[in-house]
Image (cartoon, rainbow, N blue to C red):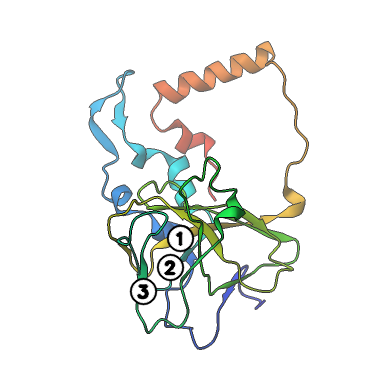
Amino acid sequence: MTDDVDIEFLCDPALAGTIPAPEPAIRFAPEWFRRMDREMGMPDEQGLPGLTVKACLPVTDAFSLGYVIPLPYAVTFGGGTGIPNLDIRWAEDCAFRPIEQHHPGQLGAPDPPFAGVVPLKFVNPWRVRVPEGYSVLFQPVMNRPDLPFYCFSGLVDCDRFATTINFPFIWTGGTQETTLEAGTPIVQLVPIRRDALIKRHGSRGSTPAELAEQDAARHRKYNEESTYRKEWRVRK
């Protein structure tokens, strides 16, 4: 890796500059979220300003977490005789096939929950390179129910896996013709340092002091404005 970066995305030199590059995830925040007002224009049950999801910092932080790999070329889904025989098309001058198909048996189809589903995969031209000791969690783009597909999650030791990783998915957009434009976010990735993972856990009833602490925090959450932003949130 070069000395001035923490993560690198590498592609075939012939592709560099011709396809959308991975970027920080916040740059792919959806239009429905960007255009939303922070306040609803009405008070909540406690008399404070009623807030929308735009004011929910945990949601914003999820939009900001890690990086997004975008679709390299425009792809149109729809037509044919319907799922599982969905017609999929892209321009003839694409440098590679952006979509390939998995065998349905790889998901156990036709058994539930994959009856009538054909598993597909986004062909990813980007190798992800991270420092020694890091894995990368690949997962569906967070908080994007508007996207008409569902990518499967995977954790890859990218400090050792020196090639590209494709992204299996299922189409959820029905049979109507739908075009995903080049640059559409297809997967969100988060580098994770393996030795920082929490591996021990416990479950028990709260102590009286812990219940009191929880009740006080709940009261502040619902009766004071912006407490999470002012005191509880850690800036990433």
Mark 1 residue type: Ile
Q: Residue at x 32, y 60 (%)?
A: 78
Q: Residue at x 32, y 48 (%)?
A: 33
Q: Residue 26: x, y in percent?
A: 43, 57
**Looking at the image, do the residues carrying marks 1 and 3 touch, with CB atoms under 8 Å apart?**
no
Q: Amino acid at mark 2?
A: Leu
Mark 2 and mark 1: Cα distance apart in space: 6 Å
Q: Nearer the viewer, residue 52 or 71?
A: 71
**Which residue sits furthest bottom?**
14
Secondary-structure class at tag 2: loop
Q: Quadrant of residue 81?
A: bottom left
Name the residue that disc number 2 marks.
Answer: 71
Q: Residue 101 placed where, x, y %?
A: 51, 64
Residue 74 seen in this snapshot: no
Q: Which residue is rendered at x = 69% and y = 59% of the image? A: 135
Drawn side of residue 179 relative to residue 84, left or right: left
Residue 186 bears which disc, if any? Answer: 1
Crowdedness near tag 2: few (<14), some (14–19) or many (≥20) residues, C-alpha within 10 Å: many
Residue 185 seen anywhere in this rendered image of the structure: yes
Residue 154 on image: x %, y %:
62, 54
Q: CA distance from mark 2 to mark 3?
A: 12 Å
Asked whether 151 or 9 is in front, the reply is 151
| Amino acid marked by disc 3 | Trp
Q: Residue at x 38, y 60 (%)?
A: 86
Label whose residue precedes the other's in the sequence (2 or 3): 2
State the image quarter where residue 183 is shown.
Answer: bottom left
Disc 2 to disc 1: CB gap under 8 Å: yes
Q: Residue under circle 3?
A: 90
